[in-house]
Amino acid sequence: MMGAMSQTITSPASVVPEPDPQLLQRAASVRQAAMALGQCSDAERRAAVEAMATALEAASEEILEANRADLAAAAADGLASALVARLKLDGLKLAGAIAGVRQVAALADPLGRRQLHTELDEGLVLERVTVPLGVVGVIFEARPDAVMQIASLAVRAGNGALLKGGREAGRSCRAIVAALHRGLAGTTVAPGCLELLTSREESLGLLRLDGLVDLIIPRGSNALVRFIQDNTRIPVLGHADGICHLYVDRAAEPAQALRIAIDSKTQYPAACNAIETLLLHREVASIFLAEAIPAFTAAGVELRGDPVACALGVSHAAGPGAWDTEYSDLILNVKVVADLEEALEHVRRHGSRHTDAIATTDPVAADRFLRAVDSAGVFLNCSTRFADGNRYGFGAEVGISTQTLPPRGPVGLEGLVTYRYRLRGEGHVVADYADGSRRFRHRSLPL
Amino acid sequence: MMGAMSQTITSPASVVPEPDPQLLQRAASVRQAAMALGQCSDAERRAAVEAMATALEAASEEILEANRADLAAAAADGLASALVARLKLDGLKLAGAIAGVRQVAALADPLGRRQLHTELDEGLVLERVTVPLGVVGVIFEARPDAVMQIASLAVRAGNGALLKGGREAGRSCRAIVAALHRGLAGTTVAPGCLELLTSREESLGLLRLDGLVDLIIPRGSNALVRFIQDNTRIPVLGHADGICHLYVDRAAEPAQALRIAIDSKTQYPAACNAIETLLLHREVASIFLAEAIPAFTAAGVELRGDPVACALGVSHAAGPGAWDTEYSDLILNVKVVADLEEALEHVRRHGSRHTDAIATTDPVAADRFLRAVDSAGVFLNCSTRFADGNRYGFGAEVGISTQTLPPRGPVGLEGLVTYRYRLRGEGHVVADYADGSRRFRHRSLPL
């Protein structure tokens, strides 16, 4: 029995130390401020986010200065260039981030929406209404712009946030959060709903704040996400891998399929929704590759093929593990398959259920693919790079989730919202229904 | 940085051993059968669940016989009487469970519902459609009737299930699953979508089947739920604690409030939605307790009071930890509070965010309570025992969740369903939007 297990096996959460009393105190303060924020009206929360944007504008020079200091320290530490690129804020990037905050202010209120309304019996009415999650814990690597985005989404949806940026972005994050606090100080929303964590101990402690933190959003590497998932009881919104596929069907229009393939790989190769593997129906592989090999070479992409693809001119062989590798780089696997079913089987075995696409003009093949592929995004005749909250029309993105349960795929404001059941009665008790003296009606009422 | 953490700290999941190859093979078979089931039509899934009910009827004598053997073994092992009660199936209970399976067959199809429909641009159309989760892992303590309920919900929603009953219910579970398999054999749904796990090693291995299992549903003790939450990366639907409150406001109607209090405690004291603590506004405490003390005594309930409640006649003092204890028994804490705000603070500190109720005739107090209490269910003038999927009108219940994220509270079929984004284009690529040659429209289309 499991009961015995729980006594004989060490609780794994114990590898992460208990949060220290000071962190508990700070988190409790954020939670208290968040509870008050959750009671604020739509107009109050909207005004608060606008004030955050205005304060960021006023502090632009200070934020850029802090960022320059972070960059100088990063250079001295020999930080990897990809990290430096994400760390860097310039005037244009900062202005873009501030515009993003204003867009979040303008989003429709996600709170107070009635999702269900049922008369259980005369005088006993149930409703389900959206409410804030409470407090979110956000752990970023580098990217100071993400602090502005997530903080604005959190406040718009009535939530507090504990924000932990990478150490290399410390000065930038402090300057940004100081500005956000100044902005909130002039509103009905308490600045204490946003709190910056700075030390490694604090970010470990954050993982143990169940009861005070309702959701953890990691924005960083696969290793970061997995570590967090393994070390907390708090739900985690994130994705560990993005192994996306494009299948070029027998009935694909080759030029269109190639255009989609190039975009899906090269438009931003480091993104999780870029493809890692191209699957080619054997009847089109030869024609397709004749155009694709020079096109990908021109785009700087190294193709790595299975034996059939190599026989058709792909110059590198796909090594062991290739089908399970997220390159995040200008490298693309190519595999020739016998038919759609083999392609589906490959995606099932090697995909990460993120986003997979088919290029075809055959409606039967399209329908089969769209129904059978078990990923958050399943696309027909378009680039996998469209898998993104902004492109989907969500206004801003909390993150992308490859877990199966909702929220799944690109997650907008609704990822920061939950619901509550409210039941209003007139002295109703369950005993009356158990003994048959009353019966439920379960009549749907207008939403 | 977290990156370093993930290398220096042992992955906690490693305390649970890797699943053995045979379990992996069985789980993969269930997943394959589940993928085929997910493609079945509403009518096919409905017919399959009806066939499951018919087969259970045909096997009733065999199931009851197996259950008698389990009960005999339990008696020989000296199993606790509460467990024996949950283990026991008689003709009436079995018939009720089979009727429940037929009700599940009759529920509206949860699949294929379009939740979002947006034209991103001309010829580029996004939709979000409900789809099955995939495979659920269910871990029961004792209760063989839960096997029938969850198996029918899983199949109705297009999911496979790995079912692990308690060892003490082994014969009953085997007889039930054999009947379910016979029922499915005559339908288009492969019997292999349901698989019974029997050993302790298998249930530990189940926790490591991420990628093959999408959701774990534990139906058992708090210790079981916590152990599972701590030892798996797979999402867990469940609740660890049910510490529910009833606050009797200054403006409560005393007789009605008492009736609600009695029902909330005694209608089924072992249920998670029974109250553990009664909070009394000091202005009504004396009048209320004058009636309540004899009424609770007559109902066999032991009251345990804070000093003020004891001074008003409550005979036992609430010991240390009382406010944080789920008795699951005929014991009820009583605390006198100065006002609504103190009651809210008590619920915030000691509640488990399950279900909390207020008894009042004051609309301002009611509104404050319904808005401020951060629980899955917040009730006015009715019993907390209404927090239940059947009573809410969901037809059947997967479980009750006290996590903050949806699905929250009593969870019906929708807890076994997720969604998928489908995007259909005509060769659309992201580069065209990045360079400004095309712009998104984001026009809502009819659902």
Image (tube, coloured by chain):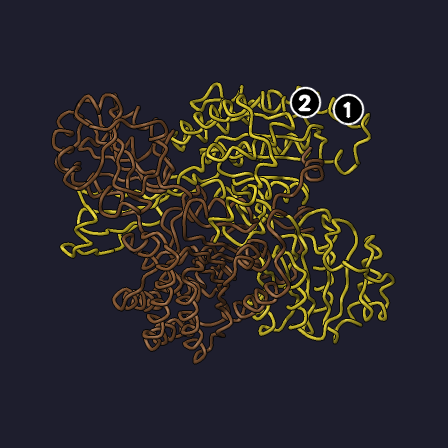
Chain colours: A brown, B yellow
Q: Relative to residue A24, is residue A43 drawn left or right?
A: left
Seen from the viewer's position, the closer of residues B312 and A312 is A312
Residue B195: x and y in percent read: 54, 25
Q: Which residue is mark 2?
A: B171
Few, some or many residues within 10 Å of mark 1 (<14, 14–19, 20+): some
Dot 1: chain letter: B
What is the quadrant of residue A205 in the picture? bottom right
Residue B253: x and y in percent read: 69, 69
Seen from the viewer's position, the closer of residues A244 and B320 is A244
Residue A289 can be seen, yes or no: yes
Residue at 61% x, 55% y is: B354
Secondary structure under tag 1 reads helix
Cα separation between marks 1 and 2: 10 Å
Q: Which residue is mark 1?
A: B73
Residue at 57% x, 54% y is: A121
Seen from the viewer's position, the closer of residues A309 and B432 is A309
Residue A40: x and y in percent read: 47, 72
Look at the numbered discs 1 and 2 and tell me whether their residues touch, using CB distance below 8 Å.
Answer: yes
Q: Relative to residue A155, is residue A294 drawn left or right?
A: left
Q: Amino acid at mark 1?
A: Ala
Residue A23: x and y in percent read: 59, 63
Q: Amino acid at mark 2?
A: Arg
